Image (cartoon, rainbow, N blue to C red):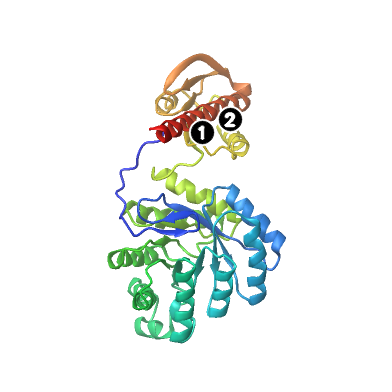
Amino acid sequence: MFHESPIKRKLTKKIWVGKVAVGGDAPISVQSMTNTETTDVDATVAQIQQIADAGADIVRVSVPTMEAAEAFKIIKQRVDVPLVTDIHFDYRIALKVAEYGADCLRINPGNIGNEQRIRAVVDCARDKNIPIRIGVNGGSLERDIQEKYGEPTAEALLESAMRHVDILDRLNFDQFKVSVKASDVFLAVGAYRLLSKQIDNPLHLGITEAGGARAGAVKSAIGLGMLLNDGIGDTLRVSLAADPVQEVKIGFDILKSLRIRSRGINFIACPSCSRQEFDVISTMNALEERLEDIVTPMSVSVIGCVVNGPGEALASDIGLAGAKGHSGFYLGGERQKERIDNTNIVDTLERHIRAKANILDESKRIDVADLSQS
């Protein structure tokens, strides 16, 4: 049961990254980035597919050399998900990947040379209808801005971002999104809040270089959660020193927890205690592993005892309230006569969850068909 989020999101300008809308009334998209050598085409294509299968709407690929640009040409032909090319300094690489079908150019206009080179990239992006992502990072600010502020500050990130925005404004190019990332949560949040007041273009959220899987997930959830709760943000990436697939899963978990966007199962599970009538932790581990392929939005509560079990089950699509020997089972908030044998919880719940997902999917297909005929 997915309830609408109370968060009022800022309405920004809508742009398109390939087939994915970013900004405006479009859903907040989730991104990740490959960490393979781009010149290893097979490995990069395989990882892009894994990231896309996890639900990513957009994937970013680093293109540091012309050799990598030639590899990108082949990669682009072998995948369907929109690709953002990450480029630094060399405008010729930007022109080349635009020719090869890049869906977005991640390149800071002020860092690619003289006015003629900047104009060449912008004109190419305009001609091919490719947006640009301005990406400011607290760890790589321009030298004069570093000297002016002494250390990265929210105001320093804002000044750097606006310097690049002003270039695109001067060239009458408005198809862009901006990020002002930092590894410090408060620095990043402060910079995004300032930037959101300055421009109406989409904002790409991220806490950069957040750390390993656990610490990075926590920092990202706090920082991105603060911004999303403010109504700020149109697309996001959780940046982890971990498998990119985990970035996607955590990104959707953040959106799901704020009731902004739901993909897959929202599990409600107790932390377990001595009241539990079955092993909640092993049950949850098995269910999450088995049901990773379910993308249908639905909520499933797995509670080990009758203290909180019935209450959580009443608000879930499927609920389990632990009891001795056989646990209470709920569908759509209603208790069923069927009770689930505690020795066979995982298999039984998996069967019911997949059946419920099929019903919800069929209902959605019928609704879409009705709309198309009306």
Residue hosting label 1: 272
Q: Position of residue 315 (x, y in %)?
A: 40, 28
Q: Position of residue 263 (x, y in %)?
A: 49, 42
Quadrant of the snapshot with the N terminus: top left
**Residue 38 appears in the picture as rendered:** no
Residue type at numbered disc 1: Ser
**Among all residues in the image, which is located at the extreme left?**
197
Label 1 with label 2: CB-CB less than 8 Å: yes
Question: What number of labels is visible?
Answer: 2
Quadrant of the snapshot with the C terminus: top left
Residue 259: quadrant of the picture: top left
Q: Residue at x 70, y 60 (%)?
A: 43
Q: In this picture, is 183 found above or below 14?
A: below
Q: In this picture, is 238 found above or below 287?
A: below
Q: Position of residue 292 (x, y in %)?
A: 59, 40
Q: CA distance from mark 1 to mark 2?
A: 8 Å
Structural crowding at the residue carrying mark 1, measured as other residues with C-alpha within 10 Å and reported as few (<14), some (14–19) or many (≥20): some
Who is closer to the viewer here, 183 or 99?
A: 99
Residue hosting label 2: 279
Q: Residue at x 48, y 16 (%)?
A: 336
Q: Position of residue 87 (x, y in %)?
A: 54, 73
Q: Residue at x 46, y 81 (%)?
A: 118
Structural crowding at the residue carrying mark 2, measured as other residues with C-alpha within 10 Å and reported as few (<14), some (14–19) or many (≥20): some
**Residue 34 appears in the picture as rendered:** yes
**Among all residues in the image, which is located at the extreme top?**
337
**Among all residues in the image, which is located at the extreme front?**
373
Who is closer to the viewer here, 197 or 166?
A: 166
Residue type at numbered disc 2: Asp
